[in-house]
Structure formats: C-alpha cells, structure tokens
Image: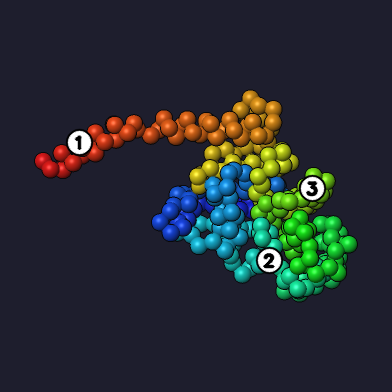
C-alpha cells in the first residue's frame, strides 16, 4: 500500500447467517479526502464501515488500513469510528465521557476542550448525557471519534437529527479535517450532503454501483442535483441487472435440458 492510500480492500466477502452481504468487493480510498457512502437502508454501508474499522467478521478477503490489517492494535489511535448509536455512559456528563476516552487513548492534554469546541458542545459540557437530545448525542459520538487526532475517521450517519445550521457547521469541520490530511469516510441518507464530498460511492444490495466525484456523477447522469443523479444510477443498475438475468421460461428450459443430459 502506497503512502497516498488510506484504505485498500480486495475481494471482501461478508456473510450474515445464510445471506451473502458482500461477494467480492474491491475498493481503494486515498488519504486526505472525504469519501461519501450513500445508498438505501440495508445496502451494506454500515457493514463496509465496520469492515474498515475491523469490528466486522468477514468470510474472506483483505482489508488494509494505513498499511496495517484492519482491526490491528497498532491502528487503535490512528482510526476512529463514530457509530449511529452513541457509545457513551448516560450517567456521566459530556466532559466526563470525553475525558474517559481521552485517557484510554492517551490523548494530549486539552484535547477534550478542543473537540468540545469543534462539535459545538461547550454549553453542554457539564450536562449528563442521558438528558441530551438526539442531535446532541450524535455530536457527543462525533466528539469521541475526534479525540486523539486520528488519521482515518469513519462516521455512520453523523448528521442524523441535526438542524441544517449545525449540519453545515459539521461539514465545514469535516472539510477542515480533510484539508489537514485526515481521511473521512461518511455515510449519509441526505442527498445534498453528497455534493460536499470529494468522492461518492453509491451502494445497492451489497454492491458498489457508482464510484465518482460529485461533478462526475452529475455529468454522467445528465442531472443537476444529487437526488436525481442517484435515482438515475439506480434505474440504470436495475435495467442492467434485469437484462443480465435470463427469462424465467428460459431458466426453466435450461434446467430441464441439464437434467435430461444428466440422465443420459
């Protein structure tokens, strides 16, 4: 893996029970960019992020992050994961939660105040987490992910439940982090957020069906907004999948022919 590559995935296969989630995904993510993961619920975004962080059991394939196998202890301080559900202690204050994780990561002194300011939680620093709103909880989870200045930050729906002003402020923060060389992988259902990314990966049914810059996606689909572009890509993928699938009658005839040949 070159120094300009943050994540490299080769032939990733993941199963969940009897279901095949991924059947051989290949992907390379460069350093210092914001990569957006978009797609309908259940398409595999969270599973892909968990695989990158190293907390997802995989059937086969390789996931390398910053030159190390994903989940390696050597990546503990270099990779951060902000989940949809805030992994915090509800009976502690915001500051106490951040201080706890800062101690675990041996973060520099003053890191708690830094991230409180970055995510806009100074006013809630002394407030118990259990009394926070859903949007504030999301910000606590993001603050924890930013403790220790990680090189790769993976965020699962970080702006869910936030008002447009705070969403804009957080995306400005994401851009500032990327400009400092941090690699961000951000999943979202909000289509207009896609245009804030450097690169977009549109997922469907465990597959990456589009990999482009925002401008490239708009140009390729002949649309002028992200939502229309995504719908166009999904329609194109649906048509391609349908044309590749043999007609039901043809499939049945093929099976009968195969059984006849086997009998002979």
Quarter the N terminus occupies? bottom right
User: Residue at label 2?
Assistant: 87
Q: Nearer the viewer, residue 17 or 11?
A: 17
- Label disc, if present, on residue 120 of the rendered structure: none
Relative to 91, residue 49 above or below: above
Cα–Cα span, label 1 and label 3 = 60 Å
User: Residue at label 1?
Assistant: 257
Asked whether residue 95 appears in the rendered view, the answer is yes
* Residue at 67 percent of width and 34 percent of height: 226
Left or right placement of residue 20 versus residue 251 in this view: right
User: Residue at label 3?
Assistant: 163
Residue 51 placement (x, y as % from top left): 56, 58
Relative to 212, residue 138 above or below: below
Residue 204 placement (x, y as % from top left): 53, 42
Left or right placement of residue 84 versus residue 41 in this view: right
- Total number of numbered discs in the rendering: 3
Quarter the C terminus occupies? top left
Secondary structure beneath label 3 = loop
Residue 212 placement (x, y as % from top left): 62, 37
Q: Nearer the viewer, residue 163 or 182?
A: 163
Secondary structure beneath label 2 = loop
Cα–Cα span, label 1 and label 2 = 56 Å
Q: In this figure, which colouring scheme has been used for the structure?
A: rainbow
* Residue at 24 percent of width and 39 percent of height: 255
Asked whether residue 217 appears in the rendered view, the answer is no
Q: Return the disc, 1 or 2, that comes first in the chain's sequence.
A: 2
Label 1 CA crowd tier, 10 Å (few <14, some 14–19, many 20+): few
Q: Residue furthest left?
A: 264
Label 3 CA crowd tier, 10 Å (few <14, some 14–19, many 20+): few
Q: Quadrant of residue 66?
A: bottom right
Residue 243 placement (x, y as % from top left): 41, 30
- Contact (Cβ within 8 Å) of mark 2 with mark 3: no
């Amino acid at each position: 893996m070159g120094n300009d590559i943050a994540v490299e995935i080769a032939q990733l296969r993941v199963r969940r029970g009897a279901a095949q989630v991924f059947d051989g995904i290949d992907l390379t993510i460069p350093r210092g960019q914001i990569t957006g993961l978009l797609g309908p619920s259940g398409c595999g975004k969270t599973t892909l992020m968990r695989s990158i962080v190293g907390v997802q059991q995989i059937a086969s394939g390789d996931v390398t992050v910053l030159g190390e196998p994903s989940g390696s202890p050597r990546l503990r301080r270099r990779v951060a994961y902000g989940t949809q559900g805030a992994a915090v202690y509800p009976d502690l204050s915001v500051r106490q939660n951040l201080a706890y994780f800062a101690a675990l990561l041996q973060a520099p002194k003053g890191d708690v105040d830094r991230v409180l300011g970055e995510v806009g939680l100074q006013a809630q620093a002394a407030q118990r987490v259990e009394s926070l709103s859903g949007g504030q909880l999301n910000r606590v989870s993001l603050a924890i992910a930013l403790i220790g200045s990680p090189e790769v930050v993976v965020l699962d729906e970080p702006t869910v439940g936030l008002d447009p002003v705070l969403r804009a402020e957080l995306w400005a923060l994401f851009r500032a982090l990327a400009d400092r060389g941090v690699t961000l992988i951000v999943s979202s259902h909000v289509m207009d957020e896609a245009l804030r990314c450097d690169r977009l990966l549109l997922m469907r049914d465990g597959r990456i069906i589009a990999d482009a810059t925002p401008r490239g996606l708009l140009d390729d689909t002949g649309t002028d907004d992200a939502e229309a572009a995504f719908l166009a890509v999904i329609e194109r993928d649906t048509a391609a999948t349908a044309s590749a699938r043999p007609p039901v009658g043809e499939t049945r005839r093929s099976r009968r022919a195969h059984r006849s040949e086997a009998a002979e």
